[in-house]
Image (tube, grey):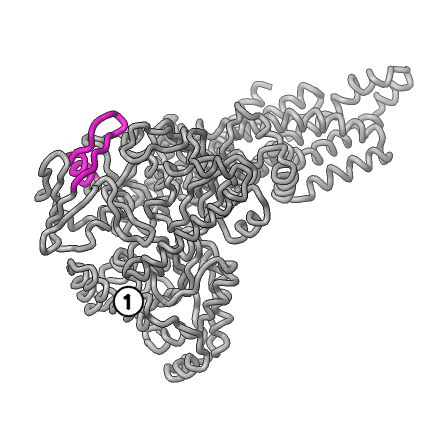
Amino acid sequence: MRSYAAQRAALALVQLAVLSVLVFVLTALLPGDAAEMRFTETLTPERISRMRTQLGLDQPALERFGHWFGNVLTGDLGTSLISGGPVADIIRHSVGATLVLTLATLAVVVPLAVVLGIVMGTRENGRLDRAITSVTLALSAIPDFVIAVLLVAVFSLKLGWLPATWVGGDLLASPALLILPVAVLFGRTVCLLSRQVRAGTISALQAEYVVQARRLGVPRRQLLLRHVLPNAAVPGVQELARTGDTLLGGVLVVEAIFAIPGFATALVDGVETRDVPVVQGLTLVLAVAALVINLAADLVCNRLVPRTELLR
Amino acid sequence: MSDALNRRSFLGLTGAAGLAALTGCGSGGEAAAQPRQGGRLRAVYAGGGAKEVLDPHVQSLFVDIARHKAMYEKLVELGPDLKPVPRLAEKWEHDAQATTWRFTLRDATFHDGKKLTSEDVLYSLARIADPAVPERVAQSSLATLDLRRSKAIDARTVELVLSAPNAEFPALLAGIGTQIVRDGFKDPTKPIGTGAFRFVSFDAGRSLVASRYDDYWDEPARIEELHILSAESEARANAVQGGQAEYANDMTATFARTAEAGKTVRIVAAKASTMQAFVMKVDRPPFDNPDVRMAFKLLADRQRLVDVVLAGRGAVGNDLFGKGYQYYPADLPQRERNVEEAKALLKKAGVLNQEIEFLTADASAGFVEAATLFAEQVAEAGVKLKVTTGSSQTYAKDLLTKGAIGNHRSGAMPIPQYITDRLLTKSPFNVTHWRRPAFDSGFAAAQVLTDETARSTKYGELQQTLRDDGGIIAWGHPDYLVAVSAKVQGVAAVPPNTLDSGRFDKVWLA
C-alpha cells in the first residue's frame, strides 16, 4: 500500500507539470494579454505598451514560463498581473466560499444518494425505484443554469423566501444564502451517485454470499448494513471522486449565477483578464485537489473491500 | 448652448416631478417629503474582479469611480449638460490667454481632520503626472499642465499654469482620475479624502464599505452606511429585486420593462445619455469616398434601430456625439433616411452589389444586434454587409486598427474631450481615422477662445463638418438606466460621469 501511494504521488507530479504547460500554452493562445485587458478609453496604447514592459510581458513566452515554474518549485506562486498582489492571497481569499459550497453539497448529497440508492436497489424496477429514477434523471438532464434561474424566480423573486444572490449578503449572517446554490449542485450530482449505489446494491444482493446469508436467516437490516452496503458503496465512492469534477463544473455555473466570490469566479476573472499567474495558480490547486480526491477514493475502496485491485 | 441647458434642466424637472408623483402615491408620502436620516444603502455596479482598485488616480471602471466618488472629490465636476461646475474649487479665474488659472479652494476638511490646502492640490496633480506609473489615467489629459511653474498663492488659492492656452481647462480637472488626495498620500489602501463618506473596508471584486463623514463641507449624507458592491447584470437585477440591494447601476432596457411591471423596483432613466454609433474608417475603401460615407448615413433607419436595439429607450442620433451636452449644435436638421439618394451616391461611387465586412463583437449591449439590423437596412440599397463577430474582450482595441466599419459606443464626457480623444490626427482612440490638419487647427483655435459664445460657434462649425463628412453614424442615444428599490429617494436622473450621478450623500431611504 505504501509503495502504491508513492507510485501514485510520482505520477501526480508528472501530471501536474504537464498540466501547467498546457494551461500556460492555452492562456497564451487567447487573444490579448494582461496589459491589453486593461485597455480602456482612458489608457492610451502607448501607455499600455509601457505597462507591458513593467509587467515583463515583453519577455519571450518560454522565459516567462521558466521563471514561473522555477518560482513554483520554491513554493512561490507569483504575483497577479492585474492587482499586483500575491497569487497565494487570491487563492486563500476565494477558496473559502467554494469549499463551504462544496462541503455543504456533499453533506446533503452523499447521505441522500446512499439512502435513495439502497431504496431503489432493494426495490429494483418497483414503482418507487422508477419514480426516484425519473426525478433524479430529470434533475440531471435539465441544465443547471435553467434550474438555478427557475429556483430564483420562484423562491426568491416570487415567494421572497430565499436570497437570490450573494451580492449584498453575508454568509455568517444569513446561512440561507447556501440553500439555492446547494439545491442546484444537488440536482446536478444526485442522479449519478444514487444510480451507482443502486447498481452496487443490486449486484451485491444477487451475490452468492448475500444469498447464502439470507438462507442462514441474517436479519434484513443487518444484511443490508453489514453485507450489502460496503460492497454497494464501492462504485459509489469511485463515483464520488468523479462527482468532485462534476461539482467543479457546476460550481462554475452556480458561482456565476449567484454571484458567489469563490474559486470559479476568480478563475473566470483570471482568464478574462489574461492574468496568467493567477490562472496557473488556481488550476494547479484544483489539479492537486482532484488528484488527492481520486487517490483517497481508491484507498477508501481498498479499505471497504480489500480485495479490490488497486492498480488497473 | 442655452438650448442644451434648457433641455437638460427640463429633463431634470420632469424627473423631479415624477419622483414627487411617486412619493405622493406611496403610503409614506409625508415621510418621503422630509428626507429621513440613517440606514444602510447597498449599491451594485458592474464588477471588475481583481481589476478593481482603491487608488482614485488609476480608476477606470464605473464601480471604482462610484467608490472613489464617495470618499474623494475633484476641484471641478461636470453638470448634467457636461459643463464644468465648482466642487472643491469654489471659483476660478484665468488670464487673457487662458494659460494661467487661479482656483480658490473651499473650506473643506479631510477625513483625518486636516484642512484642504493648495499643497494638497499640487501634490495630487504631481502624483497624477508621475511618469513611472503609466496607469494614472489623467496623465494624457493633463499633459499641458506645467507643474514647475504652478504654485500655491496662499493656503486656499492655487495657481496652475499651462504650457499651451486652453479655455477648457476646468473640464479637464473634472475628468476621470483627477481626485484631490491629501499632501503626502502614499498608501491607496488607506483612503483619506474630503468626500461625504469615510473608508471602512474594501475587498477587490466584491465590496467597499464606507460610513457617513459628519464634518463634510457640503450637506452631510442622510444614510449612515454605504456599501458599493460588484456584480454582473443578472446578479444586479436579482439583488435589487430580491431586496439585497437598494440601487443597481446600468440596467438593461429588458430589465426595465420587467421591473416597471412590478412594484418593488423603480427605474430612474437619464434620457439619451450616451451614444451608440457605427464607425467607418475614412481612409479605407470604400469609406475613403465621402459619397459612400454619406450613403451609409442615409441608409440607417435610426428610429427602428432605437426601437429594436434599445427597446425604444433612447433617442435617435444625428451623427454627432453629445446630444444635449454643452456645445452640441442642436439647430442642425435631423438626418432622415433616404434610400433613393443613397442608391444614387453608391452607384456614383461604384460600390453597388459589393460585399463589405462589418466587424462587430459582443463587447457592449446591442452591438451585434445593431450590426445585424443595419446590414438588413443597407441591403435595401443593394449593398451586402457581411457581419463578422470578433473577440469581445479585445474589440475596443482591435477596432482602432482592424476593419473598415464597426460598432462604437461612448459614455458621457464633454464634447471637446470626445474630440480630443477620438477625432484629431494625434488622438489615441481615433477609430474613424479622421485625420484632417484643417480640423485639428480649427479645434485648437476654438479651444483657446475665452469667450464661451465664440467658442461654441466655432465648435458648432467643426461638428457640422463631422456630421456631413466624418465617419461616425451616431444612430442613437440610449437612456442610462438605474434601478432603485421603492423606498430609495433622491436619485437624480443624470448622465454617468456627472456630479449628481452616484451621489449617495443625497439619497435617503423612505
Query: Where residue B471 appears, x then y in whole percent?
Result: 34, 68
- Chain for numbered disc 1: B
* Residue at figure coordinates x 81%, y 30% from the top left: A121
Name the residue that disc number 1 marks.
B463
Q: Does the image show residue B32?
A: yes
In the picture provided, is B398 more to the left or to the right than B339? left
Q: Nearer the viewer, residue A124 or B365?
A: B365
Tag 1: amino acid: Gln
Helix or strand or loop: what does disc 1 sit on?
A: helix
Q: Does the image show residue B359?
A: no
Q: Quadrant of residue B238?
A: top right
Query: Where residue B15 appears, x then y in whole percent?
Result: 43, 50
Query: Where residue B232 appears, x then y in whole percent?
Result: 48, 43
In the picture provided, is B175 more to the left or to the right than B295? left
* Residue at figure coordinates x 33%, y 29% from the top left: B213
* Residue at figure coordinates x 58%, y 23% from the top left: A4
Q: Quadrant of residue B41?
A: top left
Is A6 above or below relative to A180? above
* Residue at figure coordinates x 87%, y 15% from the top left: A218
Count the labels in the image.
1
Query: Where residue B456 appears, x then y in whole percent?
Result: 23, 63
In the picture provided, is B88 more to the left or to the right than B479? left
**Residue A94 colored magenta?**
no
**Residue B119 colored magenta?**
yes
Q: Quadrant of residue A280?
A: top left
Q: Nearer the viewer, residue A23 or B393?
A: B393
Q: Nearer the viewer, residue B277 or B170?
A: B170
Query: Looking at the figure, which quarter contains the N terminus of chain B?
Result: bottom left
Q: Residues within 10 Å of mark 1 (few under 14, many from 20)?
A: many
Span shown in magenta: B104-127
In the picture provided, is B227 more to the left or to the right than B126? right
